[in-house]
Image (tube, rainbow, N blue to C red):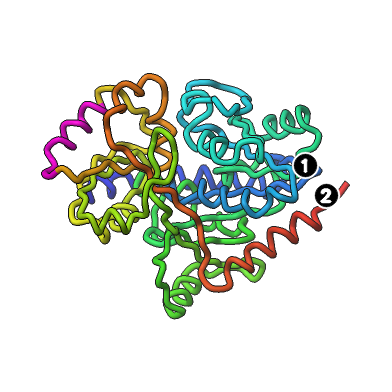
């Protein structure tokens, strides 16, 4: 594998150079960035996948939804449709993508959810269809520079900081680490719940933020297990642990290591079936899950998956296949360390309150 990575270095250098030239063209105004007359908050990453964009979008929705009419816009990765599309409460993951579906299912009428690979067109359509929209949250939009956001949030995972990664295809960077200068706030995600001030200082120094940038640190708080079919809370995870349940972890996300080790710390036995990110589950996949599940010893055993996976497991074609399986999902919630939550909230709210565009 190391040899392959070395052989791919020239391609990575070429790819990085092309993205650098593209960014220079935007910086010089040769390629234009569209500004809109409402606050646009973009959230994205330099690494490919697995940085926690959707939970942080949900954090923003919780922060803003009671006082503003919100809309989210993403490309709808993994959908079979194309162009601009507004998410209805009954839309499937195949129609709008798993992450937009998760947001719509969770917040319902509190947020307008739309998908479009062309973000400029998507925002224009949102404004045309709903004049009351006050804020647009752009998901996975750090490299989509045709829209000029008022606030740019860059996520980087604790276990794989962008400064320690390489360009695609050797590594997982979409552009050189120098692209981080466009961020207003850099959030180090998926940190341990116990996090020392010394480690925080070391990481901040390594990231070397500019004077106008803040570096903040977030982590996941896991909620109670819920059933995949009805969504009701069944019991706290500690209660299952006390009953010595065995777990089969089923995931189709970019990085499930945090969840795996969290479950390992609470259950005697944890096995895992891992699919690629945004994997569209089939009946054959469920048959494989059943085979592995049946092999696990004991009667006290359950299947745990993620909230994002539920969006792809619950479509009509799989209802018969999964109906007898004890499948649960574990919701996650973003929390910030120390005073970082108050700092983040204040900057977001101040930006929205004071936003204006030069005419």
Residue behind mark 1: 36
Residue in the foreground of this view, choosing between 179 and 267: 267
Q: Quadrant of residue 308?
A: top left
Which residue is at a point 74% across and 40% down the rendered structure image? 34
Q: x, y percentage for residue 14?
A: 44, 43
Badge 1 element: loop
Q: x, y percentage for residue 93?
A: 47, 28
Residue behind mark 2: 357
Which residue is at a point 38% across and 58% down the rendered structure image? 160
Few, some or many residues within 10 Å of mark 1 (<14, 14–19, 20+): some
Few, some or many residues within 10 Å of mark 2 (<14, 14–19, 20+): few
Apparent side of residue 38 relative to residue 277 in the rendered image (left or right)? right
Residue 13 in view (yes/no):
no
Q: x, y percentage for residue 217?
A: 50, 66
Apparent side of residue 168 relative to residue 177 in the rendered image (left or right)? left
The magenta segment is: 285-298
Badge 2 element: loop
Q: x, y percentage for residue 358?
A: 85, 50
Asked if residue 308 lies in the magenta stretch, the reply is no
Query: Which residue of the protein is positioned furthest toward the bottom in this rendering?
Result: 198
Residue in the foreground of this view, choosing between 205 and 54: 54
**Contact flag, marks 2 and 1 (Cβ < 8 Å):** yes
How many callouts does the rendering have?
Answer: 2
């Amino acid at each position: 594998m190391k040899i392959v990575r070395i052989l791919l270095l020239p391609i990575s250098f070429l790819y990085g150079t092309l993205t650098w030239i593209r960014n220079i063209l935007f910086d010089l105004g040769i390629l234009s960035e569209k500004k809109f007359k409402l606050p646009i908050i973009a959230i994205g990453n330099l690494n490919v996948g697995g940085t926690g964009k959707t939970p942080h979008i949900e954090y923003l929705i919780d922060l803003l939804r009671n006082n503003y009419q919100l809309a989210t816009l993403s490309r709808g990765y993994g959908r079979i449709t194309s162009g601009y599309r507004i998410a209805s409460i009954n839309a499937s993951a195949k129609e709008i993508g798993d992450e937009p579906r998760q947001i719509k299912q969770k917040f319902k009428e509190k947020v307008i959810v739309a998908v479009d690979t062309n973000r400029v067109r998507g925002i224009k359509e949102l404004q045309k269809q709903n004049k009351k929209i006050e804020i647009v949250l752009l998901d996975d939009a750090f490299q989509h520079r045709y829209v000029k956001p008022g606030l740019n949030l860059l996520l980087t995972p604790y276990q794989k900081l962008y400064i320690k990664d390489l360009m695609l295809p050797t590594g997982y960077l979409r552009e050189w680490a120098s692209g981080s200068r466009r961020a207003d706030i850099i959030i180090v995600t998926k940190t341990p719940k116990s996090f020392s001030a010394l480690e925080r200082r070391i990481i901040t120094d390594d990231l070397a933020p500019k004077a106008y940038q803040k570096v903040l640190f977030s982590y996941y708080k896991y909620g109670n297990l819920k059933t995949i079919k009805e969504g009701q809370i069944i019991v706290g995870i500690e209660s299952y642990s006390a009953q010595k349940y065995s777990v089969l972890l089923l995931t189709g996300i970019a990085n499930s290591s945090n969840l795996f080790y969290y479950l390992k710390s609470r259950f005697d036995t944890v096995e895992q079936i891992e699919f690629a990110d945004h994997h569209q589950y089939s009946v054959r996949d469920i048959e494989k899950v059943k085979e592995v599940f049946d092999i696990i010893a004991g009667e006290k055993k359950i299947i745990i998956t993620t909230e994002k996976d539920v969006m792809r497991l619950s479509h009509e074609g799989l209802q018969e296949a999964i109906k007898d399986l004890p499948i649960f999902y574990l919701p996650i919630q973003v929390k910030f360390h120390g005073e970082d939550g108050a700092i983040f909230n204040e900057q977001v709210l101040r930006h929205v309150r004071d936003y204006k565009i030069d005419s």
